[in-house]
Amino acid sequence: MTTKTLTLIPGDGIGPEISDAVTRILKAAGLQVNWDVTEGGEHSALAGRGVMPDATIDSIARNKIALKGPTTTPTGGGHQSANVTLRKRLDLYANVRPAKSLPGYRTKFDNVDLIIVRENTEDTYAGVEHMVAPNVAQCLKIITWEGSERVARYAFNMAKKLGRKRVTCVHKANIHKLSDGLFLKAHEAVAAEFPDIKFDSIIVDNLCMQLVTRPEEFDVLVLPNLYGDIVSDLCAGLVGGLGVAPGANIGQNGAVFEAVHGSAPDIAGQGKANPTALLLSAVMMLQHMGELAMAERIEKGLHKVLAEGKSLTRDLKGTAGTSEFADAIIHALNK
Ligand code: NAI
């Protein structure tokens, strides 16, 4: 069997430290891959090679799968965001963010296990915004059948692969009758192709109320871009915050798996960073590759270490460093 090659973008700040921890854990779990280590982010931009060099884009397009560390984006000027560049150049149309309760993270709820699928290219993020008069701004909400259908199909296929039982389309079609109405209709059409998965829909404001009272009732949620942006952060808050939230950006030309948090320049290079969010992103990557057993084994190992509470990083009120935490997970894999 030939060994698969995957793209690795260590990124900026704590990126290289957490990438190192995560690739060690993947290797210990038995993943046999060659990592094509590529550049991207501030370091690359400052060296004059661009925030997302062509060689990195080509590597992802070739290998189809990338694990990415966080990348720094300066505010108020400087280079473009590496993530926006990646999303545009590879047409990564689905942003996937699971929100799952973790042992050892005390939050209001301990039984959340849902996945948000956010349409990543349309809606008010299509970039059609202008001033129509000196004091009047207009932003167009673009929703297409093609864009809605492809994200719906991704959500249903993902639900099927992961054994999820229900997909809920989130919208505001009572007010945005044409745009959100089209999004909803496309989901109803795709749902008919998946009779084994329960399909329903909910208005976004009602969803928010339900999520903060009984989030355990939801399974897979699919949302247009703007609602998805807001609701995915709300859901991260239900299970411990952005620091432990994994994510993926998926398209026909590739899939990029990365933590939701940033490059944490305040602790970079100190060996203190928590690799949990990137590790959970790698678990999503394994699921995407069909390596379901390996994904489950790593997740269980992580849960054991979190529940034991002996080798936690400082953000979790522990004293362990990044590599000690990773070593504890590697040890837990074999217990
Ligand atoms: P941040 O998420 O990097 O840091 C916020 C706080 O959380 C800091 O105190 C940091 O030390 C802590 N933190 C974050 N990740 C941690 C981890 N794994 N372990 C322990 N502590 C952790 O957010 P901030 O400071 O707003 O952004 C820093 C840079 O990251 C910016 O340039 C921003 O543009 C970029 N960024 C990149 C993202 C990406 O590449 N996906 C996402 C979000 C921000």
Image (cartoon, rainbow, N blue to C red):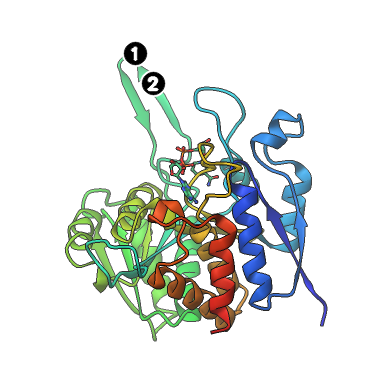
Q: Mark 1 points at which residue?
A: 134
Residue 257 seen by the camera = no
Front position in the image: 204 or 312: 312
**Numbered disc 2: secondary structure:** strand
Q: Is mark 1 on a helix, strand or loop?
A: loop
Location of residue 294 in the rendering, given as x and y in whole percent from the top left corner: 59, 80
**Seen in the image, is 178 located left or right of residue 5?**
left
Q: How crowded is mark 1: few (under 14 residues within 10 Å), some or many (20 or more)?
A: few
Camera-nearest residue between 180 and 263: 263
Which one is nearer the viewer's eye here, 208 or 13?
Answer: 13
Looking at the picture, does residue 304 appear above or below residue 53? below
Answer yes or no: is residue 63 visible.
Answer: yes
Residue pictured at 76% horizontal, 43% vertical: 54
Rendered-image quadrant of the N terminus: bottom right
Indicate the position of residue 51 as horizontal and vertical percent values. Answer: 67, 36
Q: Please state the total of marks drawn on the protein image.
A: 2
Which amino acid type is marked by label 1? Pro
Residue type marked 2:
Met
Q: Residue 131's mark?
A: 2
Mark 2 crowd level (few <14, some 14–19, many ≥20, 10 Å Cα):
few
Q: Tell me where residue 156 sits by quadrant.
A: bottom left
Measuring from the top left, give residue 147's x and y in whole percent. 49, 56
Q: Which residue is drawn at 69% across and 62% down?
A: 64
Residue at the right extreme, as displayed:
2
Q: Residue 160 location, x and y as percent?
A: 47, 80
> What's the mark number on residue 255?
none
